[in-house]
């Protein structure tokens, strides 16, 4: 892939080969089959979301540190959670745990709008800057306790979200988040203790969450009023 600089000169995308290897082996080579998810993962430059000291590992299929004791999830898990969320262009999505902003960017390319909450202000600020650089504008940011959900006075016109993704471990789906999910909506979350968790996809039917097991995962914990104590 060749990219043009602001002066019109072409600049080689040094990560193009790594991105294609990720798609072929880590995503298509496993169980990522959604063409929209694959297309977005091929498009978004993951290297922009990792610290410069780890850029050479941007497309390795493993998590990387991003500061504040947080990590950017491995590409496969990002793709898997996105695929399980079943986002479409009419969806308004709530993301709990902005982190680096990479998952946010993936969701934003697939959804109508993304609302994202991050506990650490500096991570939220960094993510917002990268998404702005990439021209992604359909994201609303908030710094606060994600376990409490989105501020009630600033909910979408429908009063709820079509999809919710929790990108940190929770002991159970926080009650406020279940309440902000639309009927027929889906929550994807890693549920369990501070070690290994169970990734589940929950569909809201008759005001109840019906869980479906996806796989075992390992995430940093979500600290908040309705999650783990700090």
Image (cartoon, grey):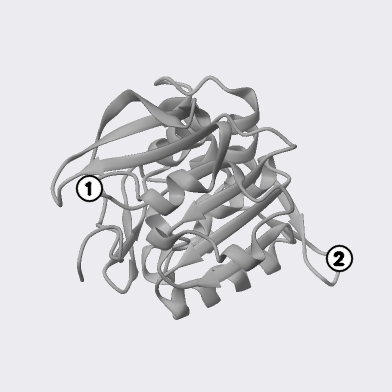
Is label 2 in a helix, a strand or a loop? loop
Residue positioned 66% across, 54% down in the render: 12
Instruction: Read off the residue under disc 1.
Output: 171
| Classed neighbour count for the residue bearing mark 2: other residues with Cα under 10 Å, few (<14), some (14–19), many (≥20) | few
Question: On the rendered image, what quadrant is the C terminus found in?
Answer: bottom left
- Which numbered tag is attached to residue 8? 2
| Classed neighbour count for the residue bearing mark 1: other residues with Cα under 10 Å, few (<14), some (14–19), many (≥20) | some
Percent across and percent down for residue 210 are 39, 25
The answer to whether residue 36 is above or below residue 191 is above
- Residue 20 vs residue 120: left or right? right
Is label 1 in a helix, a strand or a loop? loop
193 or 136, which is in the foreground?
193
Which of pointers 2 and 1 lies earlier in the amino acid sequence? Answer: 2
Residue positioned 49% across, 25% down in the render: 206
Farthest residue toward the right? 8
Looking at the image, how many numbered discs can be counted on the residues? 2
Q: Tags 2 and 1 in contact by the CB under 8 Å rule?
A: no
**Residue 14 visible in the current orientation:** no
Percent across and percent down for residue 54 are 37, 63
Residue positioned 54% across, 61% down in the render: 150
Percent across and percent down for residue 100 are 46, 63
Question: On the rendered image, what quadrant is the N terminus found in?
Answer: top right
- The CA span between labels 2 and 1 is 52 Å
89 or 147, which is in the foreground?
147
Percent across and percent down for residue 226 are 30, 59
The answer to whether residue 48 is above or below residue 186 is below
- Residue 112 vs residue 44: left or right? right
The answer to whether residue 163 is above or below residue 71 is above
Residue positioned 27% across, 58% down in the render: 227
């Amino acid at each position: 892939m060749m990219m043009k600089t602001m002066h019109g000169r072409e600049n080689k995308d040094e990560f193009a080969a790594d991105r294609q290897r990720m798609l072929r082996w880590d995503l298509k080579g496993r169980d990522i089959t959604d063409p929209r998810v694959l297309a977005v993962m091929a498009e978004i430059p993951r290297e922009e979301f990792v610290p410069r000291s780890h850029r050479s590992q941007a497309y390795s299929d493993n998590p990387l540190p991003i500061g504040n004791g947080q990590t950017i999830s491995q590409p496969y898990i990002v793709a898997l959670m996105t695929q399980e969320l079943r986002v479409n262009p009419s969806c308004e999505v709530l993301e709990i745990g902005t982190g680096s902003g990479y998952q946010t960017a993936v969701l934003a390319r697939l959804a109508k709008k993304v609302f994202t909450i991050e506990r650490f202000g500096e991570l939220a600020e960094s993510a917002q800057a990268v998404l702005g650089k990439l021209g992604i504008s359909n994201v609303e940011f908030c710094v606060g306790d994600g376990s409490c959900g989105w501020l009630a006075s600033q909910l979408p016109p429908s009063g709820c979200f079509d999809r919710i993704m929790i990108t940190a471990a929770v002991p159970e789906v926080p009650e406020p988040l279940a309440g902000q999910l639309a009927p027929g909506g889906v929550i994807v979350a890693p549920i369990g203790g501070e070690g290994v968790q169970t990734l589940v996809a929950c569909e809201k039917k008759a005001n109840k969450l019906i869980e479906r097991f996806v796989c075992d995962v390992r995430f940093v914990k979500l600290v908040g009023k309705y999650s783990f104590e700090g």
